[in-house]
Amino acid sequence: MTQTVTAVFANLDAGRNALEDLVADGFDREKVFLDEENLQVKVMVPDSVQANAEEILRRHDPKDIWSRPVQ
């Protein structure tokens, strides 16, 4: 199953840094999104790497983080 992991950040720089770290760690750039208006980074991942994606996002001190199955 695939999950969308979403993290909300206090500022745009933190979101950009989180996105860059995900891509640098091997996450497919086409599956990582930055919503600049809502200061959210979203990444679509298989269940097997969800915890890794969440750990990378947490390094950037998100205000909130959650995941939902892709419909």
Image: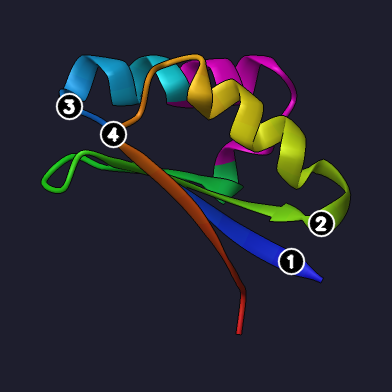
Say which mark, if any, is on residue 10.
3
Measuring from the top left, give residue 27's x and y in whole percent. 69, 33
The mark nearer the N terminus, 1 or 3, is: 1
Left or right of 15? Residue 68 is: right
The residue type indicated by label 4 comes to: Lys
Magenta-highlighted residues: 19-29
Circles 3, 4 touching at the beta carbon (< 8 Å): yes
Q: Residue type at mark 1?
A: Thr
Q: Which quadrant of the rendered structure holds the C terminus? A: bottom right
Identity of the amino acid at label 2?
Asp
Is there a contact, CB below 8 Å, between mark 2 and mark 1? yes
Q: Is residue 29 left or right of residue 8?
A: right
Gap between marks 4 and 1 measured at Cα: 23 Å
Residue at x 15%, y 23% (from the top left corner): 11
x and y percentages locating residue 35 in the rendered image = 25, 46
Residue at the limit of the structure toward the bottom, as seen here = 71
Would residue 15 appear left or right of 29 to someone viewing this image?
A: left
- The tag on residue 2 is 1
* Residues under numbered marks 1 and 3 in contact, where contact means CB atoms less than 8 Å apart: no
| Label 1, residues with CA under 10 Å away: few <14, some 14-19, many ≥20 | some
Q: Choose top left, top right, bottom left or bottom right for residue 3.
A: bottom right
* Label of residue 47 in the image: 2
